[in-house]
Image: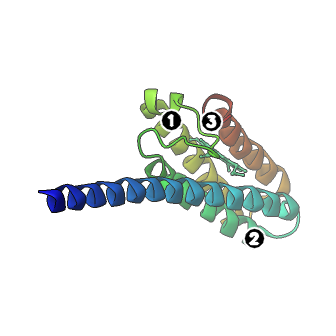
Amino acid sequence: MTRLVITCVLLCLSTVSFAHEGAEGVVKERMDRFKENKKAMKAIKGSLSSDTAVIARKASEIEAWAEEMVNFFPGGSSQPPSEALPAIWKEFDRFTDLASANEKAAAKLKNLAQSGADTSALSGAFRSLGKTCKDCHNDYKE
Ligand code: HEC
């Protein structure tokens, strides 16, 4: 009996610490990916009038992350140091729509860059993309 209790306690403890580690893992991973997003936006900004290849590549990275980002927000994963707000899980459909808008805006910029659009068109698409980041942060990030 004692052995059974000890086994159970050990099993339970390992499950708890595993869940905790997992949550930290996903929070850390998405924070890192968003930091990459910021770097990508900076690289695009610096290339608007000079390098459509960089714009297309970085916009494509942003598009790819936008497509999968909602999978990195499992229910209630807002523990510190996360800046994710609980509203995400109350309005997950809207959160998903904002990620889609981000994905579409990134795809549009990528396509423009690939088709050799001029700086003014690229700048406009870049601003629209930046707005989709902000739209989500306004409601769902601290
Ligand atoms: C659909 C919502 C959504 C979109 C779209 C979005 N973000 Fe975020 N972003 C978040 C949330 C939520 C967090 C907080 C994540 C956390 O801390 O757990 C965040 C965090 C960040 C961070 C902070 C990362 C850190 O830990 O230092 C940066 C930088 C960032 N986003 C940049 C961007 C950029 C640039 C774009 C657009 C290209 C973008 N995000 C698009 C929701 C979004």
Residue at image point 67% right, 42% down: 133
- Mark closest to the chain's N terminus, 2 or 1: 2
Most extreme residue toward the left is: 1
Asked whether residue 85 appears in the rendered view, the answer is yes
Q: Is residue 90 left or right of residue 51?
A: left
Instruction: Say what amino acid the circle numbered 2 marks.
Output: Val
Q: Nearer the viewer, residue 100 or 35?
A: 35
- Do the CB atoms of the residues marked 1 and 3 lie less than 8 Å apart? yes
Q: Is residue 98 above or below residue 28?
A: above
Q: Is residue 131 above or below residue 139?
A: below
**Percent x, y of residue 108:** 62, 52
Residue at image point 17% right, 62% down: 3
Q: Nearer the viewer, residue 121 or 130?
A: 130
**Percent x, y of residue 17:** 42, 57
Q: Nearer the viewer, mark 2 or mark 1?
A: 1
User: Which quadrant holds the C terminus?
Assistant: top right
Q: Nearer the viewer, residue 137 or 43?
A: 137
Residue 52 lies in quadrant = bottom right
Q: Give the crowd class for mark 3: few <14, some 14-19, many >=20 residues within 10 Å.
A: some
Q: Which residue is mark 2?
A: 54
The span from disc 2 to disc 1 (Cα, nearest Å) is 28 Å
Q: Is residue 94 above or below residue 63?
A: above
Is the shortest distance between ligand 1 and the CB of mark 1 under 8 Å? yes
